[in-house]
Structures are given as C-alpha cells and as structure tokens.
Image (cartoon, rainbow, N blue to C red):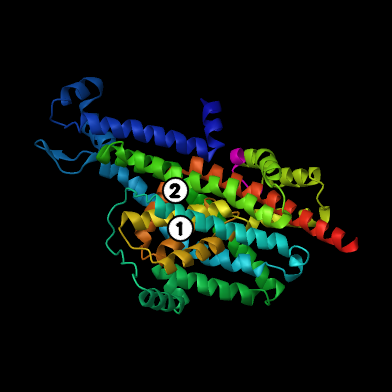
Amino acid sequence: MRDLLRWLGRSLVRQIIIAMLLGIIIGSLLMQTGIPQPDGPLAPVLSSVVPLSFNHYLTDILYGAALTHGTLLVPAAEYFQILGDFFTKALRAVAPVLVFVLITHAISRHRQGRARGLKNIIGLYIAGTFAAAAVAVFTSTIFPTELYLKAAEDTAGAPENLKAVLTTLLFKITDNPINAVVQGNYIGILTWAILGGVAMRHASDTSKIALDDAARVIHYIVGIVIRIAPYGVFGLVTATVATTGFSTFATYARLIAVLLGSMTVVALLVNPLLVWIMLRQNPYPLVWRCLVQSGIPAFFTRSSAANIPINLNLSEQLGLREETYSISIPLGANINMAGAAITIAVLSLAAAHTLHLPVHPLNALILCFLATLGAAGASGVPGGSLMLIPMACSLLGIDGQTAAQVIAIGVLIGVIQDSAETALNSSSDVIFTAAADLADRRKNGAATS
C-alpha cells in the first residue's frame, strides 16, 4: 500500500486520472440509485451493516442527503460540488495577481543584447505563436463548442460593434491598477504589467531581484492551488455526472478534438509554411524529425524546460551553430508557446459560445494578440496557459466566475491538452532555430561567394 501511495504521489496526472474515474463511478451511482433516506427502504440494510449511530452519518457524508420524512432537502451532488467550487474559487483568486507578476517579470528580464543575431528566430517564435492563435480562433469559429457551465450572476454582454469594442477596450486599459486586480479587469492588468515590466528594465538590480522573488512566490502559490486539482476534479466530475449524466463528456470530447485539431494544423501546415518561407525547400524532413525526436519526449514529460537538453542535443545533430542554439533553445522554452496560445483562444471562445456572446472580428484579432502575449508569459507556471484564460475571457465580456469554471474544465482535459501543447511548443523551438540558422548561413555563404 505504501508503494502504491508513493507511486500515486509522484504524479499529479495519475492523481487527476484516478479522481476522474472515482468521480465518474460515484456520480453514476448517485444518478442511477438516487439518494437513500435515513428512514427509507435502505435504512434496514444500512443498519445491518453499520451501527445505528453511524447510519445517519454515513448517509449524510456519502450521499449528501438531508432528508426529512422522505423529502430531499439538499441533493447529494451539491455536497460534491463544494469541492469543485472551492477549486474554481482558488483559481479565480490567484489569477489576477499571477497575470500581473508574470507579464511584468517576463518583460523586465528581456535583454536587448540577446536579440542580436537571433532576430529571425525570435520573429519566427512570435509569428508562429500568433499564427497558432489565429488558427485556434478560426477553428473555434468553424466548429463552435459549448461547455457545461453554471450560470453566472454578473456575466457582461460582449460589445457588438466597432465603437463599443473600442470604448470598452479604452476604458479597461485606463482602469486603476489596484481596481483592475480586484475586479479582474485583465486588459487593465495587462496594460499596467507591460508598463511595469518596461520600467523595471531600467530599475536597480535590487529591485529586479525583488521582482524575481515575487515571481517565485507566485509560482509557489499557483503550485499549491494546482496540487488540489485532483480534489476539485473529483468534485466537479461527480457533481456533473450525477446531475447531467454522461452527455457533458461528449462536449469535452468535442473540445479536445478542436484543441488537437488546431495543434495538428499548426504542426503540419503552419510551421512547415514558415520553414519554407525561410529556406525555400521541402520543410517536412526537418519538421518530421523534430516532431519525432523532440515532440514525442515532450509529450510524455509535459515540460518544455525538461526537454531543453533533448532539444540542445538535436540541434547539435542537425549541425546548427552552438552560439545560436545555446541561446535560442532556452529562450524558446520561455517565449515560444504556440500550444498555449491555442489553449487560451479555444477555451475562451468556447466559453463565449456557451454564453451565446457575439465575438466581433476586432475582438477576435485582439484575442490573437492577447493569446500570443499571454502564452509567452505562461512558461514555468503550473497550468500556465489555463491560468491566463481569464485574461482572454475578460476581453469577450465573460466574468471571472465563469472563467474559473473554464479553467477547471481545462484541468479535466489537461492530461491530453497539456501533453499535446508541450509537444508542439518544444518541437517548434528546434524547427524555428534550425530554419533561421540554416537560412542565415545560406545567406552569408551566398554573400561571400
């Protein structure tokens, strides 16, 4: 038993999978058998198994029933829903501060000198991430997906015309920074984070160290929140199955299909197109090799940082210049996040479709920019792309409570989503580094000849 518990404790993914299975089992039992009553037909059975003093206790705890004379006062699903609500509330609480510190820290640590000789690579990183967000927006528009969400009290309507979009955007940008954090105004948070990050680039080393420490603190807190994910997932799955049956999971399957479809398009069409633009030759041998040797390990490690040694070794095998890939690969692990941009765009648009909120074309374009910028700051944070979903939802007129539910759904499908996202992110690092390095050497060689 100790070995089993130790094996489970090593992997959050295993814990979430088991939590999902337990939630499905218990939820289906509640859905099929209903709620036993202390004085109902199952009372003799319970009394024969456990002492009478435990009868009501067992009924209340396991089944969440508060029954009087056969009348159901509190559905069992609501008791399990408390776990899910606690998890989503914790996500909602940490998200505004996370986004502010994350973006500020990411911009402040950018060094101008590092871009010399790497402009093409950085340009490919940015172009690839933006294109991925655009693909996600297009796919979500063609295949709209609706989620199972509880109705929120303060959901705002999305602006429908250009004037309303610009007015809403301007007012959110000029919001007070403290009020933006308190109210969950992610456009305002993003604006102040960018300004703060630019200003911090000119601050003293002591101030930069303090910001580094603040980022580590936030990472640690987010890690704690993510560690309670199995309990939140258990509560959400149990309550969902008990109240709506298994039809909800068909929606999740469609959501996963949209996510994986978008990532496949980026991996097999968008990235090869960018490589072809740089090299003017068949890109697929390079793309396929990087997907196999970098993407597959990243799929299972689910960590771009852990895949850096593999990418460095692959870059050496490809004959790339060490002075280039030794910088671009670690840099790409931090800012090249096409998969994260897809996740942010798809899930936020799924929430908008669920609430039947119209998405103006200008909002869709701004969403691509937000997803690109947000994805670049998601590296190193547990569930980083999911935690930045409220920022995108804010643009679409979706409240923080609903956005937190979307994050929880992202955690449910995270076993597949996060693996595919990391595989796309990590393999793209080598693909773009190789394309830019080979193009630069070809250009210099042509110049000297």
Q: CA distance from mark 2 to mark 1?
A: 10 Å
Mark sitting on residue 410: 2
Report the residue at 76% width, 69% height from top.
113
Describe residue 206's horizontal placement relative to residue 186 as left or right. Answer: right
Q: Secondary structure at mark 1?
A: helix
Residue 253 belongs to magenta span: no
Mark sitting on residue 389: 1
Q: Are marks 2 and 1 in contact (CB under 8 Å)?
A: yes
Residue 329 appears at what percent x and percent y?
A: 72, 53
How many badges with numbers are in the image?
A: 2
Report the residue at 57% width, 54% height from top.
338
Near mark 1 (Cα within 10 A), the count class, few <14, some 14-19 or many ≥20, is many
Say whether disc 2 or disc 1 marks the residue closer to the N-terminus.
1
Report the residue at 21% width, 41% height from top.
75
Near mark 2 (Cα within 10 A), the count class, few <14, some 14-19 or many ≥20, is many
Foreground of the two, 434 or 278: 278
Q: Quadrant of the rendered structure where residue 202 is?
A: bottom right
Residue 167 appears at what percent x and percent y?
A: 39, 78
Residue 416 appears at what percent x and percent y?
A: 50, 40
Determine if residue 89 is in view: no
Describe residue 69's horizontal placement relative to residue 410 as left or right. Answer: left
Give, as a single range, the part of the protein colored magenta: 299-305
- Residue flagged by tag 2: what amino acid is it? Gly
Describe residue 90's horizontal placement relative to residue 219 as left or right. Answer: left
Rendered-image quadrant of the C terminus: bottom right
Report the residue at 37% width, 51% height from top.
144
Foreground of the two, 342 or 94: 342
Task: Classify 13 as above or below 378.
Answer: above
- Residue flagged by tag 1: what amino acid is it? Ile
Foreground of the two, 441 or 37: 441
